[in-house]
Image (cartoon, rainbow, N blue to C red):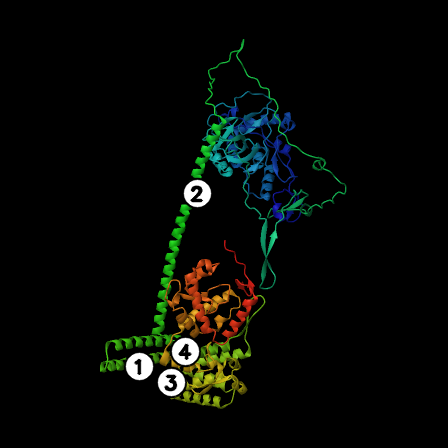
Amino acid sequence: MADQEQKTEPTEEKPSEEQTPAPASENTEETKAATPETVPPPETAPPPAAVPAAEQKIEPVTESGQETIAAPTAEEAKEDPEKKEETKEEKPKEEGDKEEKTEEKAETKEEPKDAAPEEKATAETKADDKPAEETPAESTEAKDQPREDTIQPAPAPTPQPTQTTGMGTVDNGEVHETDPHANTPRTTANLEATATVKIMLMPSGQVVTLACLLGQTLHQLKDHFSQELKLPVNLILLMFDGKSVDDNTTLADLGVGPNGTVQLEMQSADPVNTPIKTYRPRQEYHMPDVITVRVQTDENQSKDVVVEIERATRKKPYLGGYRHKKTGVLYHHATAQTIKKQPPPSQIPKNCRDTQTVQQRHRVQQTTNDTSTQMTGIGVFVSNMEDKLLVPGKYTTADEHKSMLLRKVIIIQKYHRRWLAKRYVEKLKEDKIQRLEWERQEELKKKKEKEERIKKEFERRMNPKTKEDFDLLYHALEKWRQEELERINGTSDGAERKAALCMLLDQETQLISAIGRHKLEADTENKDKRIQAFLSKAAAPKKWKGQDGKTTEMDTPYTIRAKELRDIYNSINMKYLTQDERLDVLLTLKHTVKEHDCKLTQEIIELIDREADLLMRGVREGNLEGLRKRISTLFLQYIKTPTFNPEAAKLLKVPQDPSALRKNIYFCPSCNQYLPSTEFALSSNSRTVGKCQKCSKMDNDARTRQDYSTYTYMLKMLRRSEERYGDGSRIAFLLQEQDLRYLVEKIWSRQSILSAWEDIFDLVLSRWDKHQEWSPWNCILLTKDEAAAHDRLVDIDEGYGQVFIQKVQQKHVLARNYFSRLPGMAEHLRAKANDRYTQPNGPAINGQPVPVQSKA
């Protein structure tokens, strides 16, 4: 990176196979002697009025690494008389060969600014090797011209007068008086040739050097600097010899010859408001202060490191270096890249002016300034034609001035307050529009959710699959039966009523049978899903999460065994297989079960041989369906046996140890069976085990036909909201669907206490006092929007009226009287009562009091 910053500095290189020393300087005197000046025909020579500055000598300065244009001295401007005579003798010869010189001038052009150093060195070597007749004097000057858009100091004027003849100048010692502002005729020079234009930015005095064509107009130069300096074109003025020049004037019209030099001044038409700024050339690339580097730590891991770029605080001296012959890249010695060691701090105490000055005082002083004016006197006449007569206006007192200021201030305040009021009204309008749009979106959202819920409920009734779906069907059936029964009892009596009841019973029986058929189909489909879930869990690899957060999976011999058995089971249950494919599957199954010799494997092998024999005899597949079902069932039993599939042991409900069967076994009085505790559903008000889940479900389908899916969803939402509080709430996790149904229907009458909204899907049970744990006596039934607004209340007494609070407290008393009889609730109430006397009154979280702002 340091090498790239030093590519612009010329260096001296050691000679080697790929590196050559860089040229340090050029012999200017030899170039002058070998470069005669040509004299073109008189019709092409410009008049003396447009004579540019004398020929300038360009010397590379190797200390700073930059090229500057220095004015030639008086001694260098003088030439030997012998050289002058030789030049005069060669003039006729060169006039006869003007066609040759014209072609040479067209070929002599400025080198591109992006040329490599190697190409420049080669061009200079070729120019030095040419004879004097073929090397014009302007070629050396064109090569040493600086790049476009580079800042150079202004050249010093040549002390000796010169005479311009064509492209070169000859010093003949004669002095000519010329008018620099005389009209210049239209030149016939080559407009494609280049010339050096030096533009001085006023008033800063900065000089910008450009390489331009002779046919380029001043308007094009203005466009260029308008883009660079960010100024309008009409504010840029170009001056030549102190006078303004027309925009359509070209460089050739100013009298500039090919490879010549001209100096212009640039001023601003409005220097007070839009002065000309300092010109800064464009840079192609800016190195950022901070870069990010990706470093590879391991084989497949990498990390990003932030690197801060340290800028060089000193100018690197040129202490020698090398240039690559092929690429042209410059390399400096290591000494130029090493920061100089800082000297140690001086031990001698030093004092400055600030520490020796006791006190500084600034005062403003106004000194006298004597001036003079011209007055009419004896022998002096001063014209008064342009004088102006000034008449004093009305005198304004201090009170009038203050009253005028007060009136203006009041006017400004009125307009300012009007602006504030208009902005406030516009803000209110925007808020209203946003509020109406939000309400519309919420209304559409609720409507869409309701439609989706109805659609989903319709789908559940048409294609029931789960237990909740069939509970919904039985609940709808019971609701229809009750409505029909009320209609019959209200419209008929006697024999007509009995006939209607018999017809209602027949319809109910048909609907129950239809529901039963759907249940059989769902049981078959659910059974296949349970089997596939069992096989997938057994074949799943072991997973754990490491410290880096990545999940690692590992296959054990047991999981690989379970995966093979799963693939075989899926293969034997596939349909539409050819005879050969079926025989291959049976052969694979036979080799798998032959690994263990027992009664189960012998029966499976016998059935496999029987199916293979029947397939070879050409029996139809429809007659083999029962045999294949037996093979599939026995092989599933083989897979569930932990001896043959060890991964199945942890997925079986029945423990393999017989002694474990004697633990947690209860008797069901309905089906007269001893079942484990997992088969019994215990509610919060249960004191005995009661019926098992299967009997309870059968009783619900036959008699009560209750649907608890809505309350299941409401209980899930309640538990999720209590988890977000994170204060150790437990009562919400003790309640069951039956308890929540009693709380909603009996205590809160199945509607919102604020708006009396009755849609159960929009109602939620929220905390009455959010600083206390949720309980049946610390809750309120509201809609979702009302619950969100209730949670934002800081003080309940300020948010609701006294009548409403008493109504809520009355419902809390009813809930406390009912739920305090449940097991576990009484102990919790006693613990809360003890805490009430030991802890201070007011809101609290986890036993810690919460500060509440006092009422004003």
Q: Amino acid at mark 1?
A: Thr
Q: Which mark is first along the chain, 3 or 4?
A: 4
Q: Which residue is mark 1?
A: 509
Count neighbours of disc 4 (C-alpha within 10 A) and say few if under 14, some if 14 to 19, many if 20 or more: some
Q: Amino acid at mark 3?
A: Glu
Count neighbours of disc 3 (C-alpha within 10 A) and say few if under 14, some if 14 to 19, many if 20 or more: few
Residues under labels 2 and 3: Cα distance? 87 Å
Q: Which mark is first along the chain, 4 or 2?
A: 2
Q: Nearer the viewer, mark 1 or mark 4?
A: 1
Residues under labels 3 and 1: Cα distance? 33 Å
Q: Which mark is first along the chain, 1 or 3?
A: 1
Name the mark on residue 625: 3
Q: Which residue is mark 2?
A: 420
Residue 806 seen in this snapshot: yes
Q: Amino acid at mark 4?
A: Asn
Q: Amino acid at mark 2?
A: Leu
Q: Nearer the viewer, mark 1 or mark 2?
A: 2
Classify residue 496 as left or right of residue 602.
Answer: left
Q: Nearer the viewer, mark 2 or mark 3?
A: 2
Count neighbours of disc 2 (C-alpha within 10 A) and say few if under 14, some if 14 to 19, many if 20 or more: few
Q: Nearer the viewer, mark 2 or mark 4?
A: 2
- Taking the spot 61% from the left edge, 51% from the top edge, the residue there is 308
Name the mark on residue 526: 4
Q: Secondary structure beneath disc 3?
A: helix
Residue 575 seen in this snapshot: no
Q: Are marks 4 and 3 in contact (CB under 8 Å)?
A: no
Q: Nearer the viewer, mark 3 or mark 1?
A: 1
